[in-house]
Image: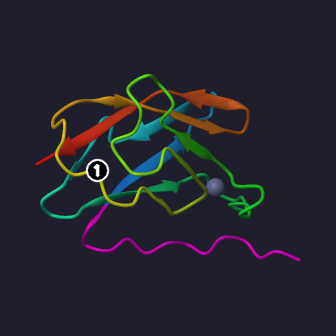
Amino acid sequence: MSSPTLAPSPGPKDVVVKILLDDAGQIKAVPDPFWVSEGKDEKVMWVCTKENHQHGTADNPCFTVDFNTKDGSPFHGWHFSGHGASSGLAIKGGPYHKVYKYTISMSGKSCDPGGGVTP
Ligand SMILES: [Zn+2]
């Protein structure tokens, strides 16, 4: 039996992006876009703010994050999933201040917020 994902506790270098699912079933990411600083070794932590639900397991996460446009990902990975998912460090050397579009999928819905890297 798998256990539910523990609530993450962001560290000082985590830029928290909250995933909201409103009453109309629309997903939003806050902030949109996010910015992480390469020089400060910042990472994104995506957290689910849906209440009264189990966040799912590694096999069945409550949301997924995909940097799968032609722009690719500003991070070393492009697919992340689950409450408290971490982007890992940004790829060094830019491009900076470029908004990468990505897709959050949750409960059969999706949205396309953005984010990027500053020096
Ligand atoms: Zn969740």
Q: Can you tell me which quadrant of the image ligand 1 is in?
A: bottom right
Which stretch did the figure color magenta?
1-14
Q: Residue 49 in magenta?
A: no
Residue 77: where, in percent of width, then height?
Answer: 47, 50
Q: Quadrant of the N terminus?
A: bottom right
Task: Look at 72% across and 39% down and name the residue there.
Answer: 107
Instruction: Say which of 41 and 48 sits in front.
Output: 41
Residue furthest out toward the top: 70
Q: Amino acid at mark 1?
A: Ile
**Place of residue 106 in the rendered image (x, y in percent of width and height, measured from the top left):** 65, 40
Q: Secondary structure at mark 1?
A: loop
Quarter where residue 14 is shown: bottom left
Residue 77's place in the image compared with 11, above or below, is above
Left or right of 9: which side holds 116?
left
Percent position (x, y) of residue 61?
A: 70, 55
Q: Residue at x 60, y 52 (%)?
A: 50
